[in-house]
């Protein structure tokens, strides 16, 4: 079993990923906790190696299981919406909630790839291993996710016309 | 003009996943393809947006319950921890909110949760204004109140004490809930402000949820499920005033075994 401090050191990253993946602080809380529980139950399967990727794999499995469960509408917390802190932004005026909403419109499997590559900075191979899919699938999902996010952020939400190449 | 750059290569370029040689080669070819250059710029902007939005989480102190969990070696004492974690997050002022219009949740607790704050708010609104008959059994008969409601709910009810929070028990009443009889416990402070704790038991409930918060006009409600019991604390108080009271109630109730 990895040293406790090694696990502790990974939790902030897990929280960041979970927060972006779920779009919600409470959901992220649950997801991280479920992931740690699952990981702690499977330490015997752990082999020295990339702890972060291993934990992200656990989180992917938990996330997918949750998606498979019957989807139910949960009310948003309006008070928390209002309480989102406004931070100085270098890049543009985009609010956190706008980004949350944009990400929520991506299919979950595309969102995972986009975040593992774009936020967690995993290599394509690591991403493929975490998600248990071929590298080619990672690339196609990444490409679709980026195109769709671009369209959503540009305000139209619809897929762009396919460009004819050659 | 060189051929268009392969899309996978282009992504790898944007993600810094090419060797130095490859990167230099792509950079040179990009000069001839302004549309692909714009595409890469857009991807880089997306990445910057993601980091900008979510990196602040990295600097936040860990919720104590999560740290404790990592240190626990996975011993199964997790249910209280889940609530504790949620409380910890709220308490340390994590205000990254619940956003987006909806979220997918696993099924078990969701039906109850979806209607809980509304049911509690209705009960609160109906009975709190009552001057002469706000409750059926008053605080002067607390033992009888507990025995009676426990019998009707089919589970041992505990009436949390909120003296330390400045609220004394007014009493309680039986109310209908989706799953049969429920209880409404009422408290009042010296200024006459009233809180209600709505309790119902449903064997279909299991596990535990994080604290959730709902607001309807001026009425704040914290609600949660623990075991078979669903709770909702409502009051016309600001969220930050109600939260410590809900925390106290949770702690007092959490010591109880759940069927």
Image (tube, coloured by chain):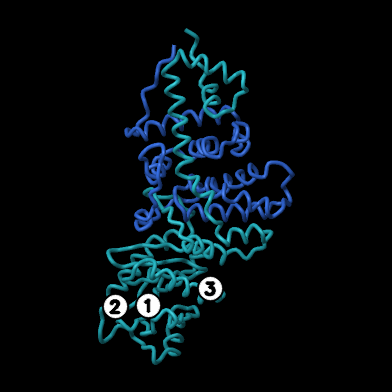
Chain colours: A blue, B cyan
Q: Nearer the viewer, residue A37 or B94?
A: B94
Comes first in the chain, label 1 or label 2: 2
Comes first in the chain, label 2 or label 3: 2
**Residue A73 image point, x, y percent:** 39, 53
**Residue B163 image point, x, y percent:** 43, 83
Determine the residue positioned at 48% across, 38% down. A111
Give the farthest residue toward the top: B1
Determine the residue positioned at 37% across, 55% down. A83
Q: Disc 1 on helix, strand or loop?
A: strand
Q: Are marks 2 and 3 on the same chain?
A: yes
Of the numbered discs in the image, which one, if any, rests on residue B254?
Answer: 3
**Residue B238 position (above or below residue B167):** above
The CA distance from mark 1 to mark 3 is 18 Å
Q: Which residue is mark 2?
A: B127
* Structural crowding at the residue carrying mark 1, measured as other residues with C-alpha within 10 Å and reported as few (<14), some (14–19) or many (≥20): many
Q: Are marks 1 and 2 on the same chain?
A: yes
The CA distance from mark 1 to mark 2 is 9 Å
Q: Disc 2 on helix, strand or loop?
A: helix
Q: Chain of mark 1?
A: B
Say whether marks 1 and 2 touch (CB < 8 Å): yes
Q: Chain of mark 2?
A: B
**Residue A47 image point, x, y percent:** 74, 44
**Residue B219 position (above or below residue B152):** above
Q: Nearer the viewer, residue B49 or B106?
A: B49
Q: Which of the two discs, 1 and 3, sits closer to the camera?
A: 3
Determine the residue positioned at 45% across, 38% down. A107
Say whether marks 2 and 3 touch (CB < 8 Å): no
Of the numbered discs in the image, which one, if any, rests on residue B184?
Answer: 1
Q: Disc 3 on helix, strand or loop?
A: helix
């Amino acid at each position: 079993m990895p040293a406790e401090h090694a696990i502790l050191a990974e939790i902030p990253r897990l929280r960041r990923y979970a927060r972006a993946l779920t779009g919600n602080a409470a959901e992220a809380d649950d997801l991280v906790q479920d992931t740690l529980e699952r990981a702690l139950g499977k330490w015997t399967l752990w082999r020295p190696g990339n702890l972060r990727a291993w934990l992200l794999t656990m989180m992917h499995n938990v996330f997918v299981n949750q998606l498979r469960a019957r989807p139910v509408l949960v009310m948003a917390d309006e008070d928390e919406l209002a309480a989102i802190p406004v931070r100085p932004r270098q890049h543009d005026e985009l609010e956190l909630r706008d980004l949350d909403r944009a990400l929520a419109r991506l299919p979950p499997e595309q969102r995972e790839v986009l975040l593992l590559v774009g936020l967690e900075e995993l290599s394509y191979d690591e991403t493929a291993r975490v998600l248990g899919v071929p590298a080619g699938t990672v690339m196609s999902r990444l490409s679709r996710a980026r195109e769709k996010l671009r369209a959503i952020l540009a305000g139209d939400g619809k897929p762009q016309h396919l460009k004819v190449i050659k | 003009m060189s051929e268009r750059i392969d899309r996978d290569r282009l992504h790898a370029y944007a993600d810094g996943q090419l060797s130095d040689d490859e990167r230099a080669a792509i950079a040179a070819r990009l000069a001839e393809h302004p549309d692909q250059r714009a595409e890469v710029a857009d991807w880089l902007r997306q990445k910057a947006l993601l980091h900008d939005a979510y990196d602040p989480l990295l600097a936040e102190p860990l919720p104590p319950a999560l740290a404790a969990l990592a240190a626990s070696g996975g011993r199964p004492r997790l249910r209280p921890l889940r609530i504790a974690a949620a409380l910890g997050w709220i308490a340390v002022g994590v205000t990254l909110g619940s956003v987006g219009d909806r979220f997918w949740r696993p099924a078990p607790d969701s039906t109850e949760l979806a209607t809980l704050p509304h049911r509690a708010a209705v009960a609160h609104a109906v009975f709190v204004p009552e001057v002469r008959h706000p409750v059926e059994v008053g605080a002067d008969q607390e033992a009888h109140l507990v025995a009676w409601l426990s019998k009707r709910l089919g589970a041992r009810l505990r009436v949390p004490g909120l003296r330390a929070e400045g609220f004394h028990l007014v009493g309680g009443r039986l109310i209908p809930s989706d799953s049969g009889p429920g209880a409404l416990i009422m408290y009042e402070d010296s200024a006459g402000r009233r809180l209600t704790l709505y309790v119902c038991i449903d064997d279909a409930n299991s596990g535990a949820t994080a604290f959730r918060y709902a607001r309807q006009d001026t009425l704040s409600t914290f609600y949660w499920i623990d075991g078979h019991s669903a709770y909702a604390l409502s009051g016309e108080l600001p969220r930050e005033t109600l939260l410590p009271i809900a925390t106290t109630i949770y702690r007092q109730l959490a010591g109880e075994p759940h069927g």
